Image (cartoon, helix red, strand yellow):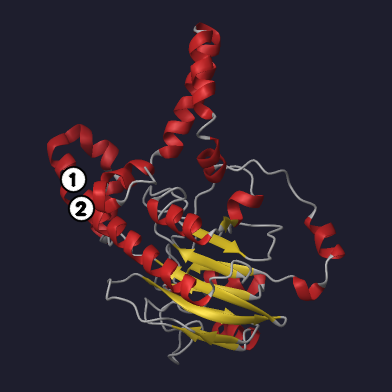
Amino acid sequence: CGYISPERFVLAQTINLSFPIWLVLGLILLVVNLMVWRRMSLAWAVAFIPCSGPILTVSPLNLPLRKDKIVADSDSDSIFTLMTYNAYMFRDFDDYNATESSPTLQYIIDKDVDIVCLQESSNLFLTPNGTFVRQRYKILDMYPYMTHGEFDGDFVLSKFPIRNITPEQPAWGSGGYLAYEVDVHGHKLILINTHFQSFAFKSDERQRYQGLPGELKESPRAELSFVKRTLLAKMNIAFRLHAEQARHLVAFVDSIALDQEVPVIIAGDFNDVAGSYAYRLLRNRLHLSDAYADVAFGPTITYNRNRFYFHIDQILYRGGMTVFDIERGDVRSSDH
């Protein structure tokens, strides 16, 4: 499905979201067939071989690294840390009106990484007000370099010098990307903070989707109509825009870093899963690696609300860099 352009057959991108479900069902059937029909189990085993690439992208099986040894054996000037975080305006999803302290901001402070790519962070660091004052000034003290764009308060906080090189982009809506040149210990890094088009589900639509399994029993026709006319319609718009935004991003990176040895990181809220058309387009055309697939073990989710349990926040990279560790945070103040 990820090879099919949404302009040709957009439903393929929705089907692609279900890949982990088919993987689990296939494994279950493989085990069942080993007990009741061994010849069929061979067919399932053969089927998994051409799917091994996508499977290991969604659920990598990397052995844990001795990251403490790697750090000890490396030059400190050659190592840096990066975080991507859709911050939900730094509000607490379960206590939205709290203004004294933000669990999201505190997580960023505690992790103390070198570069933070933020999406949906509002204008907290630009507009002086009485919200999260202590944490905000702590962040500003930690990160001397800060730059932002026009997409839902998307910011980059950095301990390294940073220069905005974002190109002009079509008026897609809420989606887009921001581009920066970062001086990391004397090495030029092209950093793309990505926030592709959201599905734009309203709060009541999210709640209705969450209760969909039960409601289908009561009024199947009405709920199926809701899925088709509302959920799928909005998803189709977003998937087509993801493809446009990914193509624009590919052309931009090629225009400034055609040499594949130039370090490039594309990180952020893709609003799309590994294996999607936009994801594959970026990886294949720009020869990018997936940080999660390279060092993680097992599947993960990065969106945690309303039963939208998907891995939609990504970190892709290339050019003389090696990933030695990746961690998904467990703070649930944001929906990412």
Residue 241 occupies which quadrant of the picture? Answer: bottom left
Apparent side of residue 98 relative to residue 140 in the rendered image (left or right) = left
Residue 39 position (above or below residue 145): above
- Write the residue at 52% across / 15% down: 41
Can see residue 299? no
**Image coords of residue 78 (percent x, y):** 76, 72
Q: Nearer the viewer, residue 91 or 267?
A: 267
| Residue at (64% x, 40% y) in the render | 61
**Residue 81 visible, this angle:** yes
Callout 2 secondary element:
helix
- Determine crowd level at label 1: few under 14, some 14-19, many 20+ residues with C-alpha closer than 10 A: few
Q: Nearer the viewer, residue 200 or 186?
A: 186
Left or right: residue 10 versus residue 70 is left
Q: Determine the residue positioned at 53% across, 15% down.
A: 42
Return the residue at label 1: 228
Give the camera-side residue of 309 and 251.
251
Q: Which mark is residue 122?
A: none
State the SS at label 1.
helix
Q: Specify whether 282 is left or right of 181.
A: left
Where does residue 74 sit, x and y in percent of width and height? 83, 66
* Tag shown at residue 233: 2
Query: In the rendered view of the protein, which quadrant contains the N terminus?
Result: top left
Tell me: residue 330, above or below residue 209.
Answer: below
Q: Earlier in the sequence, mark 1 or mark 2?
A: 1
